[in-house]
C-alpha cells in the first residue's frame, strides 16, 4: 500500500532502482524498466539509450528507458516519466530503430507536459499555444 497518494508502486520501484544506480556511480548511464510495474528489465545500466534499447530487445510496447541522474530519482519524478511514456504509448508512439538517435524527453514544465500529452492524444491535430 502506498503511504503517499498519487505515486504508484511502479513509480516507487523505478525511483528506488534509479537512486541505487546513482549511489553506485552510474550517473549518465541508461536503465530499462517495465511500464506495467516499474521493475527493472535486467538491473543493468548501459552507456547509451540505444544500448539499453538493444539490450531490452527493442521492446517498443512495454519498456521505458531512463537516464540515471546525479541526484537520484524521487517517486513523483518517476510517476511523471511513467505517465508520459504511457501517454505516448496510448497515443500510438513507438520507438524507432535503436540505431536512430533522437531525444524524447519529458517536457520540464507542467503546462508544457499537459500541452504535449493533449497534442499526442489528439493524433497531432490539437496544438494550443
Image: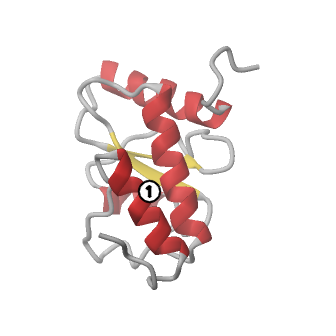
Q: Position of residue 40 (x, y in %)?
A: 55, 40
| Image coords of residue 21 (percent x, y) | 37, 28
The figure's colour scheme reads: secondary structure
Locate residue 81, reporting x and y percent: 46, 46
Q: Is residue 99 visible?
A: yes
Name the residue rendered at 67%, 14% in the picture.
3
Residue located at (24% from left, 33% from top): 27
Task: State left or right for residue 86 relative to residue 54.
Answer: right
Which residue in the protein does label 1 denote? 114
Q: Secondary structure at mark 1?
A: helix
- Quarter of the view holding residue 124: bottom left
Q: Is residue 116 left or right of residue 17?
A: left
What is the residue that sits farthest to the right in this orientation?
1
Residue lying furthest top: 3
Along the line of sight, the residue nearer the viewer: 117 or 126: 126
In the rendered view of the protein, which quadrant contains the N terminus?
top right
> As drawn, is 98 to the left or to the right of 55?
left
Q: Residue at (50%, 24%) from the top-left corner?
A: 16
For the point 60% across and 30% down, which residue is it?
A: 7
Task: Give percent across and percent down for residue 82.
Answer: 53, 47
Of residue 114 and residue 39, the one placed in the foreground of this image is 114
Query: What residue occupies the far front of the structure in this picture?
Result: 129
Using the image as rendered, state which of residue 81 and residue 4 is in the foreground.
4
Quadrant of the image for the C terminus? bottom left
- Work out whether residue 43 can be spotted: no
Q: Looking at the picture, does residue 14 appear above or below residue 113?
A: above
Q: Dot 1: within a 10 Å radius of its alpha carbon, few (fewer than 14), some, or many (20 or more) residues?
A: few
Amino acid at each position: 500500500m502506498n503511504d503517499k497518494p498519487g505515486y504508484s508502486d511502479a513509480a516507487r520501484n523505478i525511483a528506488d532502482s534509479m537512486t541505487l544506480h546513482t549511489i553506485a556511480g552510474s550517473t549518465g548511464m541508461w536503465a530499462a524498466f517495465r511500464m506495467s510495474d516499474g521493475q527493472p528489465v535486467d538491473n543493468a545500466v548501459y552507456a547509451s539509450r540505444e544500448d539499453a534499447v538493444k539490450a531490452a530487445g527493442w521492446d517498443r510496447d512495454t519498456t521505458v528507458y531512463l537516464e540515471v541522474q546525479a541526484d537520484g530519482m524521487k517517486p513523483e519524478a518517476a510517476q511523471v516519466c511513467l505517465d508520459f511514456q504511457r501517454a505516448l504509448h496510448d497515443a500510438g508512439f513507438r520507438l524507432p530503430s535503436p540505431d536512430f538517435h533522437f531525444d524524447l524527453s519529458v517536457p520540464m514544465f507542467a503546462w508544457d507536459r499537459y500541452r504535449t500529452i493533449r497534442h499526442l492524444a489528439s493524433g497531432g491535430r490539437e496544438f494550443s499555444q
